[in-house]
Amino acid sequence: MLPFRFVLLDLEVPVHSYDVFRHYERLHWNLSDLEFDTVDPDLVRPEYVTLAKSAAMGESNVIAAVHGFLEEFVDDYDFSTFAVVWGYQEVQHHYAFRSWLRAVGEDVQEQAVDAMREPYAPGTTPSATLATNIISELTVNHVYRAVSTWVQEPVLKSLLLNASRDEAGHAREFIHYATERLQRRPEELPSVLETLYVYSSEAKIKHPVSTFKSGIAEMGDHETIDTGFDLFLEQVAADGELEVLHDKVRRTFANMTGLNLSSNAKVRRALAEAIA
Ligand SMILES: [Fe+2]
Ligand SMILES: [Fe+2]
């Protein structure tokens, strides 16, 4: 039997999702690697519980997101395959944060999680959807890593570090697919710059999904991912950390597009030129 890779090469089908699959297989960690029964309640501060609940809620968005990807990318088997592989890791993050919460006698409300199932409006273009996901992966990667150095409880610390590494990988793959898509569909560039401009204008960290999911009645006063971001900025972030994150995101988009996007004003200019 021919090796899988050889057959694919023979057909000249570029399957990036296969390489990602193999890469994730090598880096994969398990919930059972985290020793939830060793969590010392004396090391757990109330803020950790709030952060873990916010993270569990943010990660629960995965199902609506996969739903949206499969709808929006019906013409792209490779990206759709990646979306499913990605989804597995986000489900793992959701369960990991909930397992930690249960270990300290807490949990998120099932009703709040159920409310996250419903799909939300797609981006203005598929490239804009990819851009949104690049921003959220870079943000969550940054926040999880910073919070992991701040948290004193070892199990939550490892969980955050593991998840943060996964989010970096996710950002890299969304960047790959967005770069490739923009080469094929340069007419979608304005929608990407518009997404970046809206994000870059925010004076706080906001998960793009919150824009679509705010006002869900079932959520009530339950934690959302933004509760965690607010707490991060108030208690964990260093001075100017938001600007550091914004810079990182703009640099990523500059590399992707070859445009000068070093400030928000430059993003606006690039957007105006792309529309003209
Ligand atoms: Fe995640
Ligand atoms: Fe992710």
Image: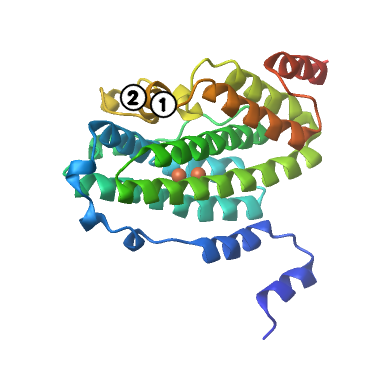
Q: Which residue is mark 2?
A: 216
Q: Identify the image quadrant of the N terminus.
A: bottom right
Q: Residue at x 47, y 35 (%)?
A: 143
Real-space Cα separation, disc 2 to disc 1, in angstroms? 6 Å
Q: Is residue 268 above or below residue 188?
A: above
Q: Which residue is mark 1?
A: 213
Question: Would the CB of label 1 be found within 8 Å of ligand 1?
Answer: no
Q: Secondary structure at mark 1?
A: helix
Give x and y (percent) for residue 147.
41, 37
Q: Residue furthest left?
A: 105
Left or right: residue 164 versus residue 56 is right
Looking at the image, which is closer to me, 84 or 76? 84
Q: Residue at x 46, y 25 (%)?
A: 212
Residue 74, visible in the rendered structure:
no
Q: Residue at x 48, y 61 (%)?
A: 28
**Residue count near mark 1 (Cα–Cα under 10 Å), binned few <14, some 14–19, many ≥20:** some
Task: Kindly indicate whether the residue at mark 1 contacts the one at mark 2 (C-beta within 8 angstroms).
Answer: yes
Q: Is residue 173 above or below residue 238?
A: below
Q: Is residue 76 above or below residue 268?
A: below
Q: What amino acid is labelled 1 in the image?
A: Lys
Residue 171, visible in the rendered structure:
yes
Res. 144 image quadrant: top left
Looking at the image, which is closer to me, 70 or 221? 221
Left or right: residue 147 versus residue 122 is left
